[in-house]
Amino acid sequence: MRIGVNVPNFAPGTDPDVLRRWAQTVEGLGFDLLMVSDHIVVTPDVAEQYPAPFYEPFTTLSWLAGVTSRVQLGTTVLIVPYRHPLLTARMAANLNRLSGGRLVLGVGVGWARQEFEALGVPFRQRGALTDEYLRAMRDAWRNTDDYDTGAIPIWVGGNSEAGMRRAVLLGDAWHPLRVTPGWLADAVGRLKAIADDLGRPMPALMPRIALQETREPITDPDRLAGVGTIDQIIADLDQFRLLGAETVVLDPFNGDLAEIRQPEAAWRTLAAVAAYRTSQEER
């Protein structure tokens, strides 16, 4: 099972040097994938969770492609209705080509109503727009003479039934975000049932989970996967591997802005995860 990291690309304390250090840490520890988030307008509803500055994902990943050589680069998740699909197709294709085929495009419908209003995009139509735009992007990439890219994996985010259905119909993978271990185990069964009903193959499972190490075990039955002692975090990864997850993305931002300025604690936890994976591979 591959493991990725969602690198914070927002909030005071984030700057080019911190992003570079994050990228070098993720790649240096042997992780497989580095992902960043997406917002364009930091409206009040966005700023409440993800304050400025916010580094736009295509720009940021293009720059990070130049300071890395192996790790894959991705979005978790790109808000599809915010950009014209041919613009997204062009930027994604160019980034994929310039990075040596390293792009993973995680996508979603979005949630920030004020940001939709600022961009002039109808909030109530975001699901239909996402479906239309994803189809347009795939159609554009078929013109390989123009877009000059290989296949770009599309991971469809969204924990709802609609997100699962969109993943089955339009994605290469389902990319649920910040889940509990028990919820995901049940959701995999629902995803298979949706795929069977639609007569389509089941998409790959690529969840993004929290990453927050604690000194004492968390016993709350609603504990998020990836939150707890290092043993609990490792157990969650093992469970998801047994569920069939091909990649798990670790998200070290848990709402504390101080963590943005002081990422060393997250790096220590990532180092422990990397050490465990190395020990498993050497068995």
Image: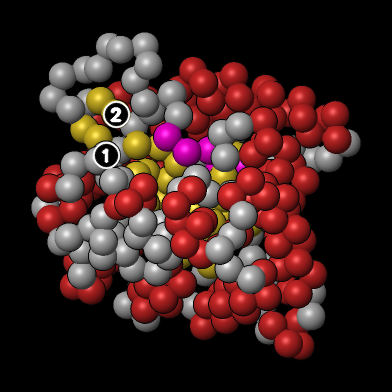
Mark 1 or mark 2, earlier in chain: 2
Q: Which mark is residue 254?
A: 1
Highlighted magenta segment, given as a residue range: 173-178
Q: Is residue 177 magenta?
A: yes
How crowded is the residue under tag 2: few (<14 C-alpha within 10 Å), some, or many (20+)?
many
Q: Looking at the picture, which amino acid does disc 2 mark?
A: Val
Residue drawn at x 25%, y 17% as measured from the top left: 218
Where's residue 128, x and y in %?
72, 50
- Residue that mark 2 sits on: 227
* Observer able to see residue 248: no
Where's residue 76, x and y in %?
47, 53
Q: Which mark is residue 216?
A: none
How crowded is the residue under tag 1: few (<14 C-alpha within 10 Å), some, or many (20+)?
few
Q: Looking at the picture, which amino acid does disc 1 mark?
A: Asn
179 left or right of 168?
left
Where's residue 91, x and y in %?
56, 77
What's the distance in space between the residues labelled 1 and 2, CA to CA?
Answer: 10 Å
132 left or right of 72?
right
Mark 1 and 2 residues: CB-CB less than 8 Å, in contact?
Answer: yes
Residue drawn at x 24%, y 30% as measured from the top left: 230
Q: Quadrant of the C terminus?
A: top left
Where's residue 262, x and y in %?
11, 52
In the rendered image of this protein, does residue 167 appear above or below residue 58?
above
